[in-house]
Image (spheres, helix red, strand yellow):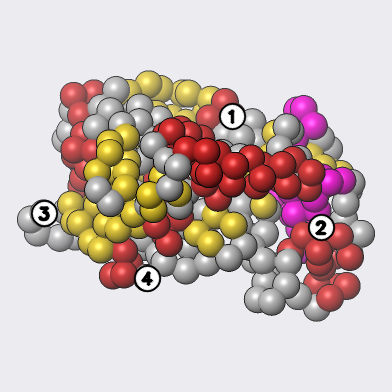
Amino acid sequence: MSMPSSANYADLAPLRREVPLAPFTTLGIGGPAEFFFEPQKPEQLADLLTALEADGTPFRMLGGGANTLFPDEGLRGAVVHTGGMRRLFRDEPGLRAWPGVTLPALVRSAMELGLAGVHQLVGVPGQVGGALAMNAGASDWGIWDQVEEVTYWVPGPREGLKIEAHPAAECQPRYRDGNLQGAVVLEVLLRLEESTKKAVKQAQDNLLRRKNQSQPVRLASAGCAFKNPAQDAAGRLLDQAGMKGKRCGQAEVSPLHANFIVNLGGATAQDVRALLEQMEAAVLAESGVQLERELQVVTPT
């Protein structure tokens, strides 16, 4: 594929070619992106996406790469990385964030200001845009619980404005699904609660202590591989099916938590896909439950 000539993309956002994707994911897996864009501002991101869509150039959004498995052979078309968009502002009733703000930075900033609400994201990798897309959080809480307003770019054949701001209630997010329907977050206003730095830090420390005891936080993983079924836990079902410690190549089901796949060093996307299939089959055979993947497996384009 050659870059369409009807838009001067280099003027819209910094562009690199044949960029390996593995360093941009928490699993450390992925071949090169044919075109790799790094917009620096929300308006720049919106203009870029509008141009790519108008030219029919396939694109994939990439934030912190915390729940994404890219193919070993890489991707044709464009990957749009939001890592350069890390502005965070104090704005009543909480914080206003661009999509590239990392979750550790968001959690740390809220704590320093004595604001409670996003402390449950402590220890979670990734960026705000991706967290909103998947409604990241704990089993009974998601980041959308703190959203006051979100501004996003809207895809599809439309006339006029493609940037819209909406209150959270209009978006109707679900468990592990921000319900964006192809829209791309440009900015979000998070509603937080006034507290104290000491109290928020204590809450974070308690959560982090529990995570360190039950999750492989120091190894390369993409977080939970599967969503929790209703009234159950994917980790429990996988443990019951005997999947802890199972391997495919250098990909392993964590012996600490059966819903985490870790890269022992040199794992391929093929290794992870094969392991996911084994995990699904084992739980279906043992419990009759068809697990739904939380890990986003990207197929080659």
Q: CA distance from mark 1 to mark 3?
A: 35 Å
Kind of residue indicated by mark 2: Gln
Q: Secondary structure at mark 2?
A: helix
- Furthest residue in direction right, as rendered: 242
Judge left or right: residue 169 versus residue 128: left
**Quarter of the rendering occupied by the N terminus:** top left
Residue beneath disc 1: 22
Other residues around mark 2 within 10 Å, as few (<14) / some (14–19) / many (≥20): some
Kind of residue indicated by mark 1: Ala
Vertical comparison of 174 with 216: above or below? below
Vertical comparison of 160 with 204: above or below? below
Mark before the other along the chain sequence, 2 or 3: 3
Q: Position of residue 151 (x, y in %)?
A: 24, 52
**Residue 283 falls in which quadrant of the image?**
bottom right
Mark before the other along the chain sequence, 3 or 4: 3
**Residue 186 falls in which quadrant of the image?**
top left
Numbered badge on residue 161: 3
